[in-house]
Image (tube, rainbow, N blue to C red):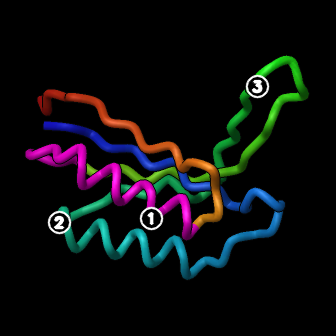
């Protein structure tokens, strides 16, 4: 089984707040396809990273998780690319971890 985590920003690359409907749409898509989703959206998480010696970048984001029996990297790559466009990002972080459910 795999755990997929989607780190969805609250603001686009220009600093504009993204519409709430966008998050509802993604939540519904994932729930329909995979039968369930966990959304961590009560208090935004904060991301911080440096690409080089420049000032650090900051993001406020929510995290969505789904567990899948059959992990299809190609499908997830295409889905992530669609999120890049919808959330107006260079790249939305989506990560996968192989897990054991106890």
Identity of the residue drawn at 36% across and 56% down: 38
Question: Residue at the bottom extreme?
Answer: 21
Mark 2 to mark 3: distance in Å?
36 Å
Q: CA distance from mark 3 to mark 1?
A: 25 Å
SS type, badge 1: helix
**Closer to us: 40 or 76:** 76
Residue 76 magenta-drawn? yes
* 82 is higher (above) or lower (below) than 54: below
Classify 92 as above or below 41: above
Q: Which residues are magenta?
A: 67-86
Q: Earlier in the sequence, mark 1 or mark 2?
A: 2
Instruction: Looking at the image, tell me whether mark 2 or mark 3 is earlier in sequence order.
Output: 2
Left or right: 31 as drawn, with respect to 85: left
Judged from the image, the secondary structure of the residue bearing numbered disc 2 is loop
Image vertical order of residue 81 relative to residue 51, above or below:
below
- In the depicted view, which residue is nearer to us: 40 or 1? 1
Assess whether residue 24 is covered by the magenta stretch: no
Residue 94 left/right relative to 97? right
Residue underneath mark 3: 50
Name the residue beneath numbered marker 2: 35
Q: Nearer the viewer, mark 2 or mark 3?
A: 3
Q: Secondary structure at mark 3?
A: loop
Tell me the quarter of the picture where residue 52 sits. Answer: top right
Instruction: Characterize the local packing of mark 2: few (<14), some (14-19) or many (20 or more) Cα atoms within 10 angstroms.
Output: few
In the rendering, at what x and y percent does residue 65 appear?
36, 50
* Residue 19 higher or lower than 88, as above or below: below
Which badge, 3 or 1, is on the more N-terminal residue? 3
Q: Which residue is mark 1?
A: 82
Residue at image x 59%, y 58%? 42
Which residue is farthest right? 55
Q: Position of residue 16 (x, y in %)?
A: 81, 68
Q: Is residue 3 left or right of residue 5?
A: left
């Amino acid at each position: 089984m795999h755990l997929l985590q989607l780190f969805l920003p609250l603001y686009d690359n220009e600093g504009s707040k993204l519409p709430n409907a966008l998050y509802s749409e993604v939540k519904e898509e994932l729930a329909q396809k995979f039968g369930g989703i966990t959304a961590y959206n009560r208090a935004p998480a904060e991301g911080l990273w440096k690409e080089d010696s420049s000032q650090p970048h900051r993001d406020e984001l929510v995290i969505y998780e789904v567990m899948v029996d059959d992990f299809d990297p190609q499908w997830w790559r295409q889905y992530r690319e669609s999120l890049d466009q919808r959330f107006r990002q260079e790249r939305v972080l989506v990560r996968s971890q192989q897990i054991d459910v106890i």
